[in-house]
């Protein structure tokens, strides 16, 4: 009598591992769609009939492992210039600590994965995540660059939350700071404290990073305060580290500003000697004695984690909803 065709027989015929054949026949992640179809076709040719008892045991083991990983572990992916560049940036190191802290409080561990500067490791990383049963994915904010690149993300088998900019990821949920309302809040406070001519300064990459929301709110507030269109223009600086001092002081003198809203912290304390220093409102206040907008990092982390876990739960339903756009409001700090 001809012996019963087994997974080992199919694997030997196709030059694959027994595990790969098993995953393909059960429709699990870990093998490509092309391989899955080839295995099913060859199994049918050989007359393979699965053993119900062994099939149930394999499903139990696989699903039990993936279920534990799925709910207890998520990934954070990024394509900054180096593997550790994201965490070497002072602001984003703080940003990540808040995200990690909120996840830890929920019993969730965040694994970080570098996709490579040119995204050359993307396929490898997501294949690894599939094989390990990790389905929840955070996409870190893009690197400090003038040419942002959207990461091509797989829609199937993963639940994704990004941190913007929203226009880079129109098909995925996004949690980001409320740039527009944050600037309006800073403008209102400075106006209430007597400022008549308010200017805005930010780093060049923060223009596209904020979807130009700061610039839009700045011009709206200028018009609402009675200023003619285009009279006051934001100052964009290429180097956020100290090399644009003279350009800032020239802009400050020419604009005759008595209040400045800024995302670059080195302007704090920098003023024209023969004039009163302008009142400063900084984005991302993080030192005693500074005033401006606290971006509310704890709320950002909590919202992102809740949105990702909600999406992981919703993934068990076939229908997909439209992506959420969540804007985290900032708070004024004196």
Image: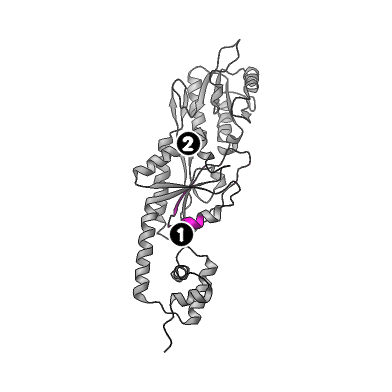
* Location of residue 201 in the rendering, given as x and y in whole percent from the top left corner: 59, 27
Q: How far apart are marks 1 and 2 (CA)?
A: 29 Å
Kindly identify the residue that appears in the image at 37 percent across and 51 percent down: 72
Magenta span contains residue 270: no
Q: What is the basis of the colouring in this image?
A: one colour
Q: Which of marks 1 and 2 is nearer the N terminus?
A: 2
Look at the picture and state if 125 lies above or below 212. below
Quarter of the N terminus within the rendering: bottom left
Magenta span contains residue 132: yes
| Residue 134, image quadrant | bottom left
Q: What stretch is highlighted in magenta?
A: 126-149
Q: Estimate how packed mark 1 is, as few (under 14), some (14 to 19) or many (20 or more) residues with alpha carbons within 10 Å.
A: some
Kindly identify the residue that appears in the image at 50 percent across and 33 percent down: 90
Depth check: give the residue in front, 79 or 258. Answer: 79
Kindly identify which residue carries mark 1: 131
Kindly identify which residue carries mark 2: 93
Q: Estimate how packed mark 2 is, as few (under 14), some (14 to 19) or many (20 or more) residues with alpha carbons within 10 Å.
A: some
Residue 198 appears anywhere in the view: yes
């Amino acid at each position: 009598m001809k012996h019963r065709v087994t997974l080992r027989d199919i694997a030997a015929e196709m030059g694959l591992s027994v595990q790969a054949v098993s995953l393909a026949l059960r429709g699990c992640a870990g093998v490509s769609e092309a391989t899955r179809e080839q295995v099913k076709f060859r199994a049918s040719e050989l007359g393979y009939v699965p053993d119900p008892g062994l099939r149930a045991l394999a499903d139990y083991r696989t699903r039990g492992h993936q279920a534990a990983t799925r709910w207890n572990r998520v990934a954070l992916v990024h394509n900054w210039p180096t593997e550790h560049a994201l965490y070497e940036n002072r602001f984003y190191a703080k940003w990540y600590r808040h995200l990690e802290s909120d996840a830890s409080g929920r019993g969730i561990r965040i694994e970080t994965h570098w996709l490579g500067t040119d995204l050359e490791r993307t396929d490898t990383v997501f294949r690894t995540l599939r094989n390990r049963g990790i389905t929840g994915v955070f996409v870190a904010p893009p690197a400090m660059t003038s040419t942002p690149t959207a990461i091509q993300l797989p829609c199937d088998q993963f639940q994704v939350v990004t941190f913007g900019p929203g226009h880079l990821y129109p098909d995925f949920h996004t949690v980001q700071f409320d740039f527009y309302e944050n600037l309006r809040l800073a403008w209102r406070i400075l106006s209430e404290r007597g400022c008549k001519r308010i200017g805005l300064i930010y780093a060049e990459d923060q223009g596209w990073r904020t979807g130009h929301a700061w610039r839009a709110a700045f011009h709206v507030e200028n018009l609402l305060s009675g200023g003619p269109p285009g009279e006051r223009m934001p100052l964009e600086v290429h180097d956020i580290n100290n090399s644009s001092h003279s350009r800032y002081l020239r802009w400050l003198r020419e604009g005759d500003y008595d209040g400045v809203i800024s995302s670059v912290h080195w302007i704090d304390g920098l003023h024209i000697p023969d004039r009163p220093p302008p009142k400063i409102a900084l984005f991302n206040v993080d030192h005693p004695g500074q005033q401006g907008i606290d971006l509310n990092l704890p709320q950002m982390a909590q919202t992102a984690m809740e949105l990702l876990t909600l999406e992981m739960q919703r993934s068990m339903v076939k229908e997909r909803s439209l992506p959420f756009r969540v804007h985290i409001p900032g708070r004024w700090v004196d």
